Amino acid sequence: MNHCPNLLIVDDIEANLLLLRALTHKINVNIIEALSGAEALEKARGLELALAIIDVQMPEMSGYELAVKLNEDRLDDKVPVIFLTANYFDETEVFKGYNSGAVDYIIKPVNSQILTSKISVFLDLFNQKQTIKLNAAELKKSSEELKNSLEQQHQLSKYIEQVREDERVSISRELHDDLGQALTAVKIDLGIIKQKIQDDDLVLRMNKVTALVSETIKTVQRLTSQLRPEIIDDLGLVAAIEWYTKEFAERAGIEVFLDLDFDVTILPDHSLTLFRIMQESLTNIARHSGATRVEVSLYENEESVHFRIADNGIGITGEEIKSKKSFGIMSMKERAASLGGSFEIYSENGNGTVIKLILLLNKN
Ligand SMILES: Nc1ncnc2c1ncn2[C@@H]1O[C@H](COP(=O)(O)OP(=O)(O)OP(=O)(O)O)[C@@H](O)[C@H]1O
Ligand SMILES: [Mg+2]
């Protein structure tokens, strides 16, 4: 802000105005002069004033009245007022002045040094106020930009998540339709061929190959369901959790205890998100925790769904949670945030790790 601050001086005697102007000529201000309250109000309208120096005794409108009027509409930008008076010792006058917005008094005849140093103080204050205003505006702008970029980031992760889900659906379909069906055809053909073989050794081999193909078909089915757990749509979230945790318990050799409320009224989108968070969390448990036992609970209260997974493993540290490389944890948080929910991960007194997900229900 380089332009000169405005200083309003008001006195009904022209010689006094001239004197004030002369006394302040060295100060870098833009002086606005007025010979009456009405003229001052007219000239000051819409202007930002650093300070007003007003004579108390003026005909028609007194200095006090002018001060009140001057600041009437300036809610955040009150103009500090120095009154010029000969009545310094009249206490009621002094209070009148303070009530109308005075911040200081100068007794006539005006002492040049006192006047200039007081003006300097107010100009300093004004400049500081301008700087604060500028900083506040910049701060507001940056905080809005930050808010926007965070919102964009959320939208982007939502979009990426959707793209990933779509990809999973198409890979799962191809696995099921192409690989799954081809393997089933191979299995049928193997059965037919086997019937025509006499050699016991070959029959034994054929049985082994058939068993291998059957296993592979199961693997394809498992991968297909993990990629796109249609069970969520077909049988609901609770059935999907039961199915997935049973498979997890068998594969990872970790006991899983379930405490699931069958009546949760969760939206399909939310169910899939919760399911994906469970997958990530159970994978972490299998990979990092060394746990032997996992508890999974799901319940609903008045306004939210609560999902909790607790293991009895080695626990997680604050550094691991906050690490910029903990993409799995970040993605769980982001998934929860994309639904307006909250996500927490912590260790309970060093006994294992807990994840807690809370999703708000929209029951309107
Ligand atoms: N249940 C848990 N028990 C103990 N440590 C855990 C547990 N879950 C996560 N951690 C720790 O937190 C770290 C970060 O987990 P996160 O899922 O973000 O990453 P990751 O599993 O190492 O890799 P990614 O998930 O990207 O494949 C892990 O490396 C591990 O040290
Ligand atoms: Mg992980």
Image (cartoon, grey):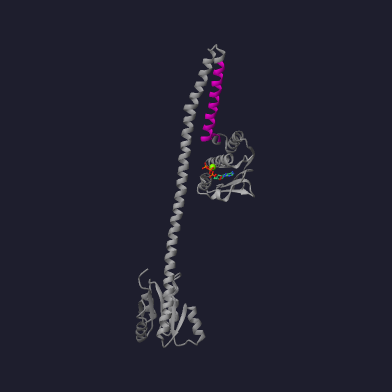
Q: Is residue 6 above or below residue 170?
A: below
Q: Quadrant of ligand 1?
A: top right
Q: Is residue 46 above or below residue 362?
A: below
Question: Residue 240, image x and y in percent?
Answer: 58, 36
Q: Is residue 183 magenta?
A: no
**Is 208 colored magenta in this rendering?**
yes
Quarter holding residue 282: top right
Q: Is residue 182 visible?
A: yes
| Whether residue 228 can be seen here | no
Give coordinates of residue 353: x percent, y percent: 61, 45
Q: Residue 264: percent from the left, percent from the top?
A: 60, 42
Residue at horizontal 47%, vertical 33%?
171
Q: Between residue 151 and residue 38, name the one nearer to us.
A: 151
Identify which residue is drawn at 45% across, 43% down. Answer: 159
In the displayed structure image, the side of residue 52 where residue 202 appears, left or right: right
Q: Position of residue 356 (x, y in %)?
A: 59, 47
51 or 12: which is nearer to us? 51
**Magenta region's main secondary structure?**
helix
- At 50% from the left and 26% from the top, the residue drawn is 180
Furthest toward the top, the residue is: 198
Q: Quadrant of the N terminus?
A: bottom left
Over which residues does the magenta segment extend? 203-231
Residue 291 lies left or right of residue 322; in this view the side is right
* Front residue of 109 and 112: 112
